[in-house]
Image (tube, rainbow, N blue to C red):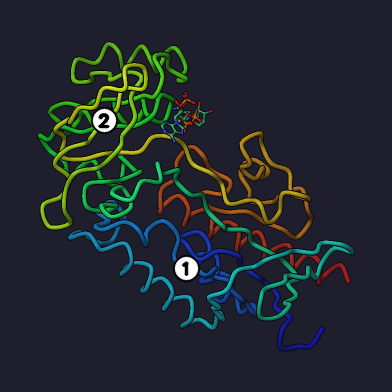
């Protein structure tokens, strides 16, 4: 292990959680490396206007916010590398060996901030209109659809919650579910069924999102799986509510997780089951999933890591 590839803190991930952790850790005079990942910046990179991040009264574009965040981390000395961490070796404890395609790095403490990915249907038109009427976050984008007709895809709690939230703005919300039975909890399903602004379209899937980047979404081509009948539903927005996948594969062999793959941390802290490894942001949070909450937990992880390093040093 040479000095150059040895850092006091290695942050894995470069969304709001990872970059906030980097800002705090480098401002605490720690030597910090951020392994940003090949797709750096996290979920805000696929968002257009961000209007709910405090401090930007006019809003800010998601990618612009991440550029500023990155610059702020670099200003205090964080080293940022746009590469994926491919393996972590925790044998023998700290320093932990982190392998990338480029080289190996060693971190006295690790902050896992690899985020979560919204599940998408995977159809071409959905990808093309992402951020132009197609979204996976009602809290982030609902406000832009005042008085519109919208569709929410999914039959779980996320879809029910997103649909309910969207009725604050929308004229009508259609929940499109591929079966005729909800996966959602009874209470959340019943609430959606009782909501006069919500209609259900059962046994149906989206075959195509109709629209252009210039004009936004104008409709969805649907297929009823029982009758094979096709139809067009006129809506101006489509929200995915088919779940999120935490990006926790890298650490699945040694970090404690819940049954959905979210990293478990001590309540009120960012400590994982491995001494010296901390977790922040959406990879450990399936409830709030906001940039501001991810940033908050990134700050907590940096403080936890700093204190852990300090305690270790004074014990030596
Ligand atoms: P779930 O996995 O529970 O539900 C996903 C839904 O999306 C299912 O109805 C599923 O259909 C559907 N779906 C999945 N893939 C596709 C696809 N390719 N095409 C069409 N439909 C698809 O995920 P959620 O995000 O809803 O919930 C995750 C966890 O978080 C749950 O434990 C939930 O209870 C919890 N949660 C709790 C909330 C709360 O309490 N306030 C709010 C939100 C989530 P099918 O049913 O046919 O499989």
Q: Is residue 252 left or right of residue 236?
A: right
Of badges 2 and 1, the one in the foreground is 2
Whether 182 is drawn above or below 74: the answer is above
Is 97 or 233 nearer to us in this picture? Answer: 233
| Circle number at residue 40 | 1
Q: Name the image quarter holding the C terminus.
A: bottom right
Question: Which residue occupies 51% across, 71% down?
Answer: 23
Percent x, y of residue 246: 56, 46
Give me the disc on residue 64.
Answer: none
Residue at (26%, 30%) from the top-left corner?
222
Q: Quadrant of residue 86?
A: bottom right
- Specify whether tag 2 is near ligand 1 (CB below 8 Å): no
Viewer-proximal residue, 274 or 166?
166
Residue in view at x 34 percent, y 43 percent: 137
Q: Are marks 2 and 1 in contact (CB under 8 Å)?
A: no
Q: Quadrant of the N terminus?
A: bottom right
Q: Residue at x 29, y 27 (%)?
A: 223
Report x, y in % for residue 64. 30, 69
Q: CA distance from mark 2 to mark 1?
A: 34 Å
Helix, strand or loop at mark 1: loop
Residue located beneath label 2 in the image: 222
Comparing 293 with 61, the one in front is: 61
| Mark 1 crowd level (few <14, some 14–19, many ≥20, 10 Å Cα) | some
């Amino acid at each position: 292990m040479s000095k150059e590839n040895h850092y006091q803190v290695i942050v894995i991930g470069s969304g709001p959680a990872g970059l906030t952790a980097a800002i705090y850790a480098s401002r605490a005079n720690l030597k910090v490396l951020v392994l940003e990942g090949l797709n750096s910046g996290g979920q805000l990179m696929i968002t257009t206007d961000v209007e709910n991040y405090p401090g930007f009264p006019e809003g800010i574009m998601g990618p612009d916010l991440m550029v500023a965040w990155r610059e702020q981390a670099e200003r205090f000395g964080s080293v940022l590398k746009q590469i994926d961490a491919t393996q972590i070796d925790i044998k023998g404890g700290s320093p932990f060996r982190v392998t990338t395609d480029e080289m190996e790095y060693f971190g006295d403490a690790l902050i896992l901030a690899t985020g979560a990915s919204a599940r998408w249907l995977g159809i071409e038109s959905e990808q093309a209109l992402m951020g132009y009427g197609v979204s996976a976050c009602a809290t982030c984008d609902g406000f832009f659809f005042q008085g519109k007709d919208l569709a929410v895809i999914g039959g779980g709690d996320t879809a029910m919650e997103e649909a309910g939230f969207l009725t604050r703005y929308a004229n009508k919300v259609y929940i499109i579910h591929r079966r005729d039975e909800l996966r959602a909890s009874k209470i959340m399903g019943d609430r959606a069924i009782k909501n006069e602004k919500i209609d259900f379209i059962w046994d149906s899937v989206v075959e195509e999102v109709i629209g252009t980047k210039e004009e936004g979404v104008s409709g969805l081509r649907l297929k009823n799986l029982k009758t094979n009948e096709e139809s067009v539903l006129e809506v101006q927005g489509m929200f995915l509510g088919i779940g999120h996948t935490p990006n926790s594969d890298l650490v699945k062999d040694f970090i404690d997780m819940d049954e959905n793959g979210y990293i478990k941390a001590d309540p009120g802290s960012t400590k994982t089951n491995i001494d010296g490894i901390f977790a922040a942001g959406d990879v450990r949070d399936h409830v709030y999933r906001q940039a501001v909450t991810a940033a908050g937990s990134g700050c907590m992880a940096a403080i936890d890591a700093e204190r852990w390093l300090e305690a270790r040093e004074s014990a030596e």
